[in-house]
Image (spheres, coloured by chain):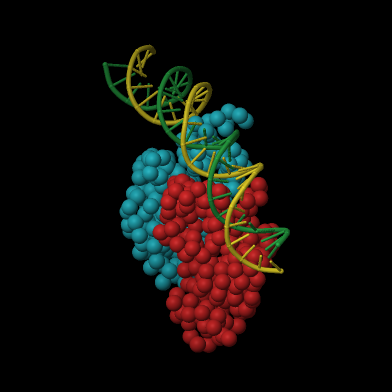
Chain colours: A cyan, B red, C green, D yellow
Amino acid sequence: MNDIFEQVIFYIKERIQVSPSEVEIILSYFKPYRAQKNEILIQQGQIGQRTFFVGKGCLRIFFNNEQGQDTTRYIAFENNFATSLVSFITGEPSQEFIQAVENSDLLYITQQDFYHLLEIIPSWDKFYRIYLEKAYVNNTNRLMSFVTMEARERYHLLLQQNPTIVMRLPNKLVASYLNISQETLSRLKGKI
Amino acid sequence: MNDIFEQVIFYIKERIQVSPSEVEIILSYFKPYRAQKNEILIQQGQIGQRTFFVGKGCLRIFFNNEQGQDTTRYIAFENNFATSLVSFITGEPSQEFIQAVENSDLLYITQQDFYHLLEIIPSWDKFYRIYLEKAYVNNTNRLMSFVTMEARERYHLLLQQNPTIVMRLPNKLVASYLNISQETLSRLKGKI
DNA sequence: CGAGGCCTTGACCGCGGTCAATGCCCGTGG
DNA sequence: CCACGGGCATTGACCGCGGTCAAGGCCTCG
């Protein structure tokens, strides 16, 4: 029953040192939530952000362009966090959506509580720093791939670096993640 | 003579609280450097990163695609920091170059010393966090603009949000920053 | 005054998007 | 259990944004 709390603690302990009493405190700020497939967890324009931890299932973060297609910025499988980080940082309305791709078991913590932990748990600062660093590296690599590579190369890179995404998700989402149309992805797959 | 040190301290004090003795310590890790126009400060493939502070002049961070054109990821004018952050974080070779766009008065601090400050100056953690947050927001906004907007829109957005870049830098660099060819930028400017 | 870099303009073309038709798979209800 | 409908994937036709190549003009600096 407490599996997901054990998962998140495992995740945290891999990154920072926390005493048993601190673990108690930290966990007390995380709340469980069960999301249905396709459920929208964060709407575009929403403020008051939350950070999610995926115990089981899958979340994606995406934004729309004016024509109505969406681009997926990040995909979180089991044992990963997902946040609409820009909005989390700035406190401004989110440009991004968060959606459950599958039925998912989640934990979440509000932005307020997260920042509160920064004040009461000395090592939480480091946890946040590591999280930010990872998010930064991730996004910058994506930026580079969009800017320097064409569709076929991005697809091959994804196959190398993150085949799970291609195997587990419908083409539609893979295309959204690569920022190409579903048709183009289909043609790419056809030609080996 | 100490102008640039005053500039960096002003920058720091705007963001975190530091005691006079801490200021002493922090400054002792920053070293001045005068860069010539077009000088490359960080080569692609280089490890052992440094963070630069621009007192006067301008730096740009860019990377190459395989065809040899470059894309400018970030432009730092006076009173801004510039780092090849991914490499700084991961310790791996930089995918990015840093170049002086104009003759520039700089300060720099090595990655080692920067991390050392994290240990000896309590509030430096916060300074780094704020820096990371800003860099993250910046990059994510750029990512979104590349992915959701076309050339003309990106140009108009840049004119709104950062006209200095357009006014102060040669077209070549503006094009590189927008990730379009010089010819396309020229055509865009022509048609209002 | 000459040379080299930068900007502009035109001709051309290819990647990848859109639209549309068709096929496939799967869940749902008669 | 089968028929139907809806969502997803595939395939073809078409086309437009923006890149490349090339030529010409302009400005700057030695």
Seen at 56% across and 51% down, the residue is: B182
Seen at 56% across and 71% down, the residue is: B57
Q: Residue B60 sits in which quadrant?
A: bottom right
Circle count: 0
> Considering depth in this image, is B50 or D22 the residue closer to the camera?
D22
A97 on left or right of B121: left
Q: Is residue A142 visible?
A: no
Q: Is residue B29 visible?
A: yes
* Residue A16, above or below B155: below
> Considering depth in this image, is A159 or B109 the residue closer to the camera?
B109
Residue B144 % position (x, y):
46, 51
Seen at 41% across and 72% down, the residue is: A119
> Considering depth in this image, is B62 or A72 the residue closer to the camera?
B62
* Residue B57, above or below A162: below
Residue B37 % position (x, y):
63, 68
Quadrant in which the C terminus of chain A is drawn: top right
Seen at 58% across and 28% down, the residue is: A190
Residue B16 % position (x, y):
45, 77
Q: Residue B86 sits in which quadrant?
A: bottom right
Residue B175 % position (x, y):
54, 54
